[in-house]
Amino acid sequence: MKQTFKTDKKVLWLQPDGQPVSCIEKLDVLNENLDDIQQECQDVFEDALLMGVDEKQARGVIAGILQGLVNPYEK
């Protein structure tokens, strides 16, 4: 059975100094965003497979999008 990323195991979100993010509202937003991303990626992946796209390529395209994310706050 293949496992998928599930956010029911809460992520320990860390600040740049290594300290955990402790604000409950921030943690809720971050975890909800992960749930949304997981569902959207799953939908894109399933659509690609239904349309005959190679599974490895579909995974690579999705991974490439994540690798290409840009930090607009970088100093």
Image (cartoon, helix red, strand yellow):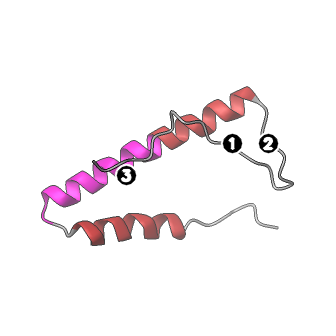
User: Which mark identifies residue 20?
Assistant: 2
The reply to whether the C-beta atoms of the residues labelled 1 and 2 are less than 8 Å apart is yes
Residue 26: image quadrant is: top right
The crowding category of the residue bearing disc 2, from other C-alpha atoms within 10 Å (few below 14, some 14 to 19, many at least 20), is few
Which residue corresponds to mark 1?
A: 12
Q: Residue at x 47, y 39 (%)?
A: 35
Magenta region, residue range:
36-52
Q: Position of residue 41 (x, y in %)?
A: 37, 52
Q: Of the residues under marks 3 and 1, which one precedes in the sequence?
A: 1
Q: Position of residue 5 (x, y in %)?
A: 44, 46
Q: Is residue 33 magenta?
A: no
Can you say whether 35 is above or below 50 in the image? Answer: above
Image coordinates of residue 3 in percent, x first then y, are: 36, 48
Q: CA distance from mark 2 to mark 3?
A: 27 Å
**Viewer-proximal residue, 59 or 70?**
59
67 sits to left or right of 70: left
Q: Earlier in the sequence, mark 1 or mark 2?
A: 1
Residue 58: name its quadrant: bottom left
Say if the magenta span includes residue 40. yes
Q: What residue lies at 77% left-to-right and 31% top-to-bottom?
A: 23
Name the amino acid type tagged 3. Cys
Name the kind of residue labelled 1 in the image.
Leu
Please tell me which residue is depicted at 37% across the width and 70% down the height of the picture.
Answer: 60
Predominant SS along the magenta part: helix
Q: In this rendering, is residue 4 above or below 49? A: above
Please name the residue that numbered disc 3 is placed on. Answer: 41
Tag in front: 3 or 1: 1
Binning the other alpha carbons within 10 Å of mark 3 as few (below 14), some (14 to 19) or many (20 upward) gives some
